[in-house]
Amino acid sequence: MTYYPYQTPLGHLTVASDGSAITAIAFGSPPLPGERRATELTNRAANQLQEYLAGKRRAFDLPLAPEGTEFQKRVWAALSDIPYGQTRSYSEVAAAIGNPKACRAVGGANNRNPLPIVVPCHRVIGANGSLVGYAGGSKIKAYLLDLESRACEEDGD
């Protein structure tokens, strides 16, 4: 396992890899298990994150290996299906995974997403449109949603 913090417009994002896939992205520069060094794969992920944050990338092309329960992985897969520039409520995500009563559990899985931004948990909002819960904080969540909204407006989407 390796990890390395990269400077971005959001501050540091630390990217972790098991050598064949990205396993985690963390806000800030926390020490993670493994060796602190950049690799070809963490550099590739950081470059794609920079492109996304510059409004030049809408989808990521990275091997991913998040660790979690089967339920969490189903939720994270559903998050990855939310189109760029759109949002879904927790209840909509719960319905998308075939468990419409699991809103709270979806919130818990969303909160434990080890790959924020790449697996777009920032696109999940409260039923009333509020920007509830985000590991990076509400300011970063608002920033990411605004970035995507502006890019879609510029493209006429």
Image (spheres, helix red, strand yellow):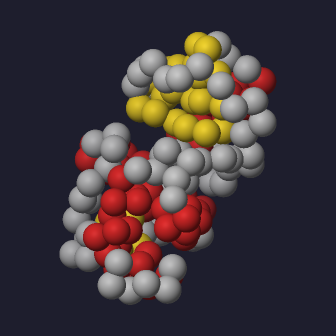
Task: Name the spot of residue 6 as percent of width and height, x first.
Answer: 54, 21
The answer to whether one can see residue 54 in this image is no
Q: Could you say which quadrant of the image residue 35 lies in? A: top right
Q: Quadrant of the N terminus?
A: top right
Query: Residue at image x 32%, y 75%?
Result: 103
| Horizontal side of residue 118 vs 27, given as left or right | right
Who is closer to the viewer here, 135 or 153? Answer: 135
Q: Quick check: 93 above or below 108?
A: below
Which residue is found at the position 60% from the left and 30% from the top? 16
Classify residue 59 by image quadrant.
bottom right
Total numbered labels placed on residues in the image: 0
Q: In terms of image quadrants, where is residue 4?
A: top right
Is residue 23 visible in the rendered image? The answer is yes
The quadrant of the rendering that contains the C terminus is: bottom right
Q: Residue at x 52, y 53 (%)?
A: 68
Q: Is residue 23 above or below residue 91?
A: above
The picture places residue 82, in percent across and down from the top left corner, at 54, 69
- Image spot of residue 69 (x, y percent): 51, 59
Q: Position of residue 89 (x, y in %)?
A: 35, 74
Q: Is residue 58 left or right of residue 96?
A: right
At x 63%, y 54%, the residue is 58
From the viewer's perspective, is 124 left or right of 120?
Answer: left
